[in-house]
Amino acid sequence: MKLSRQECGLVQSVRGVRQHQLFDWAMTIEYRDGAWDVFIRGPSLSKRGVGSTFESAWDAFCKTELEEQPRSTPR
């Protein structure tokens, strides 16, 4: 199987994460309504890339800065 540059980048990113860094983090890759959506969310940060192909979504994801998530307040 030949992977694109973007697919190789995804695999390397996942391999490079240390186990303790994965606590409460989630990565979602979806294809819906003709678009790819790559989204990662953690306890306080998130990052997203969207595109018509996986390659364009991953490139957009890589160029996007991490965004701070609003903190939920305890009730």
Image (tube, rainbow, N blue to C red):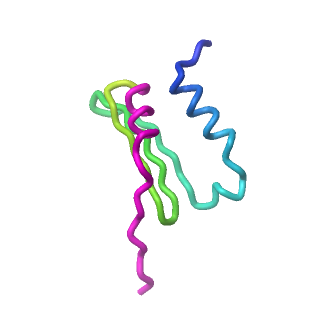
Instruction: Name the residue rendered at 44%, 54% in the picture.
Output: 66
**Residue found at the very far top of the displayed protein:** 1
- Give above or below for 56 relative to 42: above
Residue 61 located within the stretch drawn in magenta:
yes
Instruction: Name the residue rendered at 67%, 47% in the picture.
Output: 17
**Residue found at the very far left of the displayed protein:** 33
Looking at the picture, tell me which residue is in the foreground, 63 or 34. 63
**Residue found at the very far bottom of the displayed protein:** 75
Residue 36 located within the stretch drawn in magenta:
no
Q: Quadrant of the C terminus?
A: bottom left
On screen, residue 56 versus residue 27, left or right, reads left
Locate residue 2, reporting x and y percent: 59, 13
- Give above or below for 46 relative to 16: below
- Give above or below for 35 relative to 18: above
Instruction: Name the residue rendered at 44%, 45% in the picture.
Output: 39
**Residue found at the very far right of the displayed protein:** 19
Looking at the picture, tell me which residue is in the foreground, 7 or 32. 7
Locate residue 1, reporting x and y percent: 62, 12
- Give above or below for 30 relative to 27: above
Looking at the picture, tell me which residue is in the foreground, 1 or 49. 49
Q: How many marks?
A: 0
Q: Quadrant of residue 9?
A: top right
Q: Quadrant of residue 74?
A: bottom left
Locate residue 3, reporting x and y percent: 57, 18
Q: Which residues are magenta?
A: 54-75
On screen, residue 75 versus residue 17, left or right, reads left
Locate residue 14, reporting x and y percent: 63, 40
